[in-house]
Image: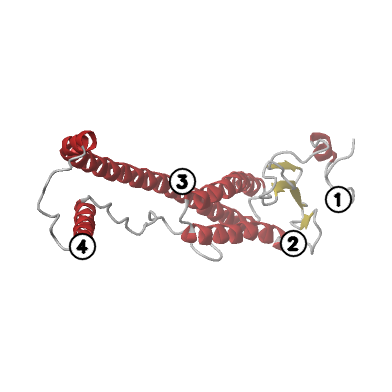
Amino acid sequence: MSSPIPHQWQVPEVFRERMGNQAGRQRVMSHAGHVLLILHELPDPETPEKRAAKMFWRNPEGTWQCSAGGPPGISMLMAHVEMFIEAANKLETRGDQARTADEWFALIQAAGPTLRTARNMHRALQEAREAAKTDRGLITARDLAGDAERAFELIHAHAQEGLRYTSARQAEEQARGAQHMLEAAHRLNMIAAVFLPVTAVATLLGMNLSHGLESWPAPQTFWITLALCFAFGLWIKASMPRPQQAEEPKPPGKGKAGKGKR
């Protein structure tokens, strides 16, 4: 069974024995001055359940090497952690621009897996720091990982608050609209009740009675009566309750995660 540890690395054999054919979770192995750090890449938005691993080996002389290549030294480890800082800044920008429930939900889906990865990375770097107490570069990497974890926590919490706020606001608007329709329907029912008797009698009897308007000049009488009916209908429409204008939505406040390196 092949090991994911690069074959050219002169690591203790115990590392390869403890490693399966997959890198597994983020963790640290230490033995005889050697430190093997197993970290995960940023989760892929399309397949967040998959975790691509990257390994960092520190030999007893204090030299770091990365399984992805690159120059020897801790710079590759620092670049790996800084990728999470940049991802947090991008998600924070999305959070500043989010307004709809779909946008908040997409932000939660993006921040959740990255938060878990950043949290486990921070924990693994802390273990590596304890295994290599003389490596000052690990302190910086660990602190950056802690900042990334905190940033993703703030973004995830802010997105959840935004989604709850948007859902509550939409429910409030729907309740307000339902109340408006209820009031309008009640007024229309009252008007229908007032005119129901005369409408029923006119329908049954025809109401072909002399009312004095037969001698009025035509067609002026017809148009005047029609205009008065329209005016009365517009007055009824104006008396109906109007829905309240919805205010511009204001997203909930949040603690800023900050930009750039932490």
Amino acid type shown at disc 4? Ala
Q: Secondary structure at mark 1?
A: loop
The image position of residue 218, as x and y in percent, is 20, 62
Which one is earlier in the sequence, the residue at label 2 or at label 1?
1
Q: Nearer the viewer, mark 1 or mark 3?
A: 3
Q: Nearer the viewer, mark 2 or mark 3?
A: 3
Q: Which mark is residue 73?
A: 2
Residue type highlighted by circle 3: Gln
Relative to the observer, which residue lies in front, 18 or 225? 225
Neighbours of disc 1 within 10 Å: few (<14), some (14-19), many (20+): few
Farthest left residue in view: 212
| Residue corresponding to mark 4 | 218
Query: Mark 3 sits on what residue?
Result: 160
Give residue 53's position: percent from left, percent from top. Answer: 74, 47
Q: Give the structural element (helix, strand or loop) at label 3.
A: helix
Q: Under tag 4, what secondary structure?
A: loop
